[in-house]
Image (cartoon, rainbow, N blue to C red):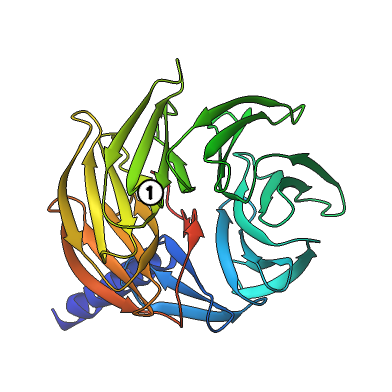
Amino acid sequence: MKHNIRTLSSFLLLLTVSFLACADEAYITNQGENTVSVINLADHSIIATIAVGKAPVGVATSQSLGKAYISNVDSHSVSVIDTNSYSVVDTIDISGSPVGIALSPDSKSLYVADWNDNRVLVIDTADTSQRREVSIGKAPAGIVISPDGSKLYVANRDSNDLAIIDTQTLKVLQRVATGEHPFGITLSPDGKQLLAVNVYANSLSVINLDNFDTHTIAVGEHPYCVTVSPDNRYAYVSNTQADTVSVIDLTQRKEVTKIRVGGFPEGINYDAASHKIYVANWFDNSVSVIDASSHKHVQDIPTGKQSRAFGQFILNKTSH
């Protein structure tokens, strides 16, 4: 009997270790201390704190490459983190101020928004010396790629519009007007809607990509980023000057509730494996955890100084 209990205990321990090892991870940029905090999303422990470049802002992660890319606005670079060893394995120099950052679905191309030079760089991840670029609107910020990799969407903060770019030719196909100062953007998981927060207008623009019809939805004060639930029903917007997350019902096209989180919430992502929403808090040096089923704030995870996590900061190590 004792032998069976020991065997069962060993088996359960092995299962727990295996579960934690393959859990999704969050890569949180801490702009005030030039580090990235890596959070295990199964138990919310800090796996590693990694020194990167100066003033890290943006994040893009790749399961297939086993890498996370971090834009460092003040050192004009992108740090490349090996997500197995939790160490910086390369630094990509950018002659500008990189902010928004995203990867193509096949992880072959890295897109970097250069805030000061009003352009987006396209960098070959296999050979980072191979680059292309496209000039766009003023102060490009948030960027996102279509699920098939054919289109690049860019929020031009100081032009008050979104640019839609063909990724093969780098031609600007269309510009879509938004509210004042669009910043964080995302696509709905089904790829049918483009969402952009308008910082100065305190609103969310929801754009139908079939006909470019736009609906504007009021949110909280000074919104920063947006994420969408896997079923395409809800959008979640971080409101930096309200310390809240607005929950938007995309069918009803209205805010249905607000969730109080940490101080000055910025980056926000939805983890499909756990059905939790993670929000980086600049003032509180933490990440707030929201349970998506109840829309309740359930936990805060201490991170580093001035957490931002702009972009897709969750690394999916599990298949969904």
SS label for mark 1: strand
Compared across the picture, whether 15 is left or right of 185 comes to left
Can residue 98 be seen here? The reply is yes
Compared across the picture, whether 136 is left or right of 201 comes to right
Can residue 84 be seen here? The reply is no
Q: Position of residue 301 (x, y in %)?
A: 32, 76
Closest to the observer, 5 or 298: 298
Task: Give me the residue at 23% from left, 80% from top.
Answer: 6
Point out the image quarter for the C terminus.
top left
Q: Position of residue 242 (x, y in %)?
A: 26, 64
Q: Position of residue 149 (x, y in %)?
A: 61, 32
Point out the image quarter for the N terminus.
bottom left
- Residue 284 falls in which quadrant of the image? bottom left
Task: Give me the residue at 32% from left, 39% from top.
Answer: 230
Q: Amino acid at mark 1?
A: Val
Residue 150 vertical position relative to residue 293 in the rendered view, above or below? above
Q: Residues within 10 Å of mark 1 (few under 14, many from 20)?
A: many
Residue 148 vertical position relative to residue 47 in the rendered view, above or below? above
Closest to the observer, 182 or 49: 182
Residue located beneath label 1 in the image: 226
The outermost residue toward the right is 129
Task: Give me the residue at 58% from left, 42% from top.
Answer: 159
Compared across the picture, whether 80 is left or right of 47 comes to right
- Residue 260 falls in which quadrant of the image? bottom left
